[in-house]
Image: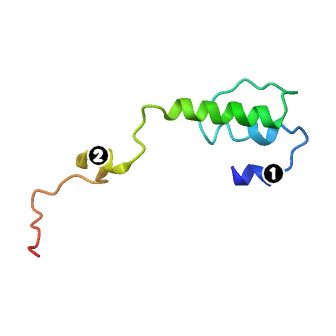
Amino acid sequence: MRWAAARTTTVKEDRIYCLLGIFRVFLPLIYGEGEHYATLRLKEEIQKRQQGQITDLQDLPTLFSLPFLRNELFVGQQS
């Protein structure tokens, strides 16, 4: 969002609307609502999308946190 804060647009709401694709959020464009209300709607929609998602990587099962398949031939070293 810092990138959008420094962005210059002809319409104030466009500073927020340019973030919709970045956050993969759909919002109807309501020109005239003002930047403040557009920001509130964006944050609210982002929070709705995040509900129910795992926010901490420690909550993931080990299988899903590894970027590669387990190698059956790998032999670990004893400490």
Q: CA distance from mark 1 to mark 2?
A: 37 Å
Residue 19 spot, x, y in % from top left: 69, 41
Q: Is residue 31 left or right of residue 77?
A: right
Residue closest to the eye, 48 or 7 = 48
Q: Residue furthest right?
A: 10
Contact flag, marks 1 and 2 (Cβ < 8 Å): no
Based on the displayed image, in which of its 4 quarters is residue 33 positioned? top right
Residue 50 spot, x, y in % from top left: 50, 35
The type of residue carrying mark 2 is: Phe
Q: Quadrant of the C terminus?
A: bottom left
| Label 2 sits on residue | 64
Please report whichever mark, 1 or 2, sits nearer to the chain's N-terminal start: 1
Residue 58 spot, x, y in % from top left: 32, 50
Question: Of helix, strand and loop, which one carries label 1?
Answer: loop
Residue closest to the eye, 36 or 79 = 36
Dot 1, how many residues are within 10 Å of its Cα: few (below 14), some (14-19), or many (20+)? few
Colouring method of the image: rainbow
Q: Residue at x 55, y 29 (%)?
A: 48
Based on the displayed image, in which of its 4 quarters is residue 54 positioned? top left
The type of residue carrying mark 1 is: Arg
Question: Of helix, strand and loop, which one carries label 2?
Answer: helix
| Label 1 sits on residue | 7
Q: Is residue 24 left or right of residue 9?
A: left
Q: Residue at x 87, y 44 (%)?
A: 9
Q: Residue at x 31, y 45 (%)?
A: 59
Residue 62 spot, x, y in % from top left: 24, 49
Q: Is residue 47 left or right of residue 54?
A: right
